Amino acid sequence: MSTTILGIDIGSTKICAIIAQKNDDGEIKILGAGISKSQGLKKGIITNIDLASKSIRSALNDAKRVAGTQYQKVIVSISGAYTKSVDSSGIVNIPNRDIGIKEINRAMQMADHNANIPNEYEKLHVLPYNFKVDDQEYIEDPLGMNGARLEVQVHIITAQKSSLSNLKKAVKLAGVEIDNIVLGGYASAISVLNHDERELGVSVVDMGGATCDIMIHAGNSMRFNDYLGVGSLNITNDLSTALHTPLSAAEEIKINYGSLKNNSNDLIELPIIGDDGATHEVSLNIVSNVIYVRVEETLMILAKTLEDSGFKEQIGAGVVLTGGMTKLEGIRELASAIFDNMPIRVAKPKEIDGLFETLRDPSYATAIGLILYGGGHFTPYEIDSNKKLRYKEETIEPSRHHQQETLFDENEMGEEKDVATLPADNAKEKLKDLANIQEEHSEGFGSKLWNRLTQLF
């Protein structure tokens, strides 16, 4: 029996809804997709529930029309702007010494319970990165093993309760109900990473319209995630300001001439902002320089975030870039220099049966990842936003909490039904200068960027 999957990526610049079907063999086929311009969102945060719901409904209706089917349960993405993460651990005794799903569930639920989560936050993902059986560490999968004690270490993603409530309201107003909530950066990683990258350890940077999400996959799961409120819209704003042209013209320039290594002195004619009908000529070299300044600054902050994460030495596969900003010509070469010559790959979503040409684009990595998540592509033994333990095709419902040594009841298993080459030394010196830069809205970021822009003219 086939299963329908509905995923909606709620981004700051666009909403993408995808309807897919999973057959009995586990194969996923996309049936329809709809895309609408985002309204009521800013830098990943819902600022107007009514406008956001209308954008969601528009994309959803288009997807339903193309797919020719209806489905009311949806998996939605959530921006890293809402989230914080913590690590935790749990230990349980195994009286019969046989480790099964229920024993793994008990250990996971114990780690979940032991986590110190602020009252205003709610858990989205509990992701195991290390199992230990008795004194043996780094067990990839303890299922079926023999031991007297099982320990698990987990990485927990949490989100603000108020923001989750706003998200749920917007989705409900659009006419559907949330089945699961997935961190956008996690969904993107699901859709772009290959087996070797997961094995070696890797950082995924999703460079979107208004935000950048960075996550690190090391060991068996996500180990780190962070967020930066900068995206390709900032490039549009920079072009508009520096070239004295309307935002609409600046966006067209970015799309048609966006490059980090354009040394052409060819001239293009642009309208002048605030002066109807008036135009002026601008060199493509100037356009490239304006874009370069913003992208370089953004990549340096992301590189500093990676440096400060403590996991840089654990990502042998380097950095995978995805998201709409990665379509800029020359971004891989620039990133390679800034990220200390680490391996850099610019990634599109994995190929899926029925994948429309429009969706074969880095900017749809999160949306495709939501469909894959619903189809069973998730971290083994993950506890999801519904507090269910996910393992392959199955889930275990959360158990009731007791003030006893055995902290959680063991429940029956339930079936999941919805499921430009640059000198490296120069880049290093520039990276050192960014030691105090944390995010765009920190004091001095905007003024520093503006000073650099004005030096171009």
Image (cartoon, rainbow, N blue to C red):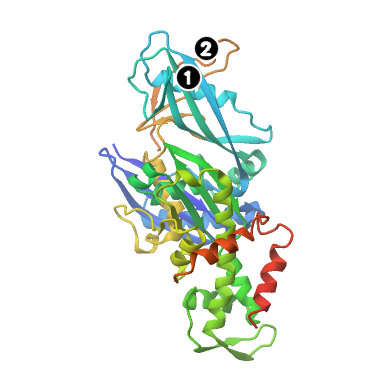
Residue 147, can we see it?
yes
Cα–Cα gap, marks 2 and 1: 8 Å
The x and y percentages for residue 277 are: 63, 90
- Up the image or down, 153 lies above or below 422; here it is above
Local SS, label 1 = helix
- Up the image or down, 302 lies above or below 252; here it is above
Q: Quadrant of residue 218?
A: top left
Disc 2 residue type (three-letter): Thr
Q: Residue at x 57, y 60 (%)?
A: 300
Check the image and name the residue furthest to the left.
25
Q: Residue at x 70, y 84 (%)?
A: 274
Check the image and name the residue furthest to the right.
443
Depth order, front residue of 316/90 = 316
**Image marks 2 and 1: residues in contact by CB distance under 8 Å:** yes
Q: Quadrant of residue 417?
A: top left
The x and y percentages for residue 226 are: 57, 48
Disc 1 residue type (three-letter): Arg
Depth order, front residue of 125/221 = 221
Q: Residue at x 40, y 33 (%)?
A: 380
User: Which of the image's four quarters has the C terminus?
Assistant: bottom right
Sequence order check: which comes first, mark 2 or mark 1? 1
Local SS, label 2 = loop
The x and y percentages for residue 204 are: 47, 51
The x and y percentages for residue 13 are: 55, 61
What residue is shown with label 2? 406
Check the image and name the residue furthest to the top.
95
Q: Quadrant of residue 201?
A: top left
Depth order, front residue of 108/53 = 108
Label number found at residue 237: none
User: Which of the image's four quarters has the N terminus?
Assistant: top left
What residue is shown with label 1? 106
Q: Residue at x 40, y 50 (%)?
A: 317
